[in-house]
Amino acid sequence: MAHLQILCFLRSGTQERWRRLIQEVAGSRREQFEAFCQHVGMTQVQIQVVQLLRSEFLLVTLHTRDLPYALRELTNSTRPFEYWLREQFQRLLGWSFQEALPNRSHDLIFLWPGDSVDPP
């Protein structure tokens, strides 16, 4: 089982739009969402809005059997629901999911327990 967490600051004034989008996915588009999750082997999705003193951010956690496949489908599928969902996220975030793919360069600077990371 693999998981991916995406953390992004919300653009000003979008929190209510995010809540409406999630209500639509959980309501009228629930069957489509469940079919997509089943298709890509996604077993759990968590979306949280976290309030900070002067801002807020969105924390998305995806649990799936095959993370690369699920991300490819989410970012490249031409099926109507996936296309619609991708467009909604892009409008609200202001950037594409492809910009957050895990094969991008990342520097792991701390890992505990273990000493498998060299100090910077």
Image: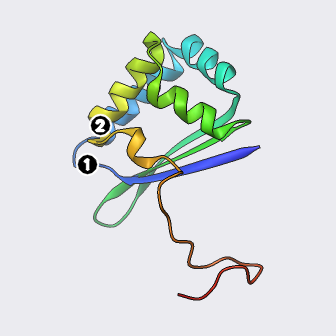
Which amino acid type is marked by label 2? Leu
Report the disc number at residue 118: none
**Above or below for 83 versus 67:** above
Q: Residue furthest left?
A: 12
- The answer to whether the residues at label 2 and label 1 have Cβ atoms under 8 Å apart is yes
Q: CA distance from mark 2 to mark 1?
A: 7 Å
Q: Residue at 53% of width from left, 22% of height from top?
A: 26
**Residue 31 coordinates in the image, percent (x, y):** 59, 11
Q: Residue at 57% of width from left, 72% of height from top?
A: 108
Left or right of 43 on screen, residue 17: left
Callout 1: helix, strand or loop?
Answer: loop
Q: Residue at 56% of width from left, 51% of height from top?
A: 5
Color encoding of the figure? rainbow
**Residue receiving disc 2:** 92
**Residue receiving disc 1:** 11
**Residue 55 coordinates in the image, percent (x, y):** 30, 60
Q: Quadrant of the N terminus?
A: top right
Left or right of 65 on screen, residue 78: left
Q: Quick one: 6 or 23, which is closer to the camera?
A: 6
**Residue 47 coordinates in the image, percent (x, y):** 52, 42
Of marks 2 and 1, which one's residue comes earlier in the chain? 1
Q: Quick one: 120 or 11, which is closer to the camera?
A: 120
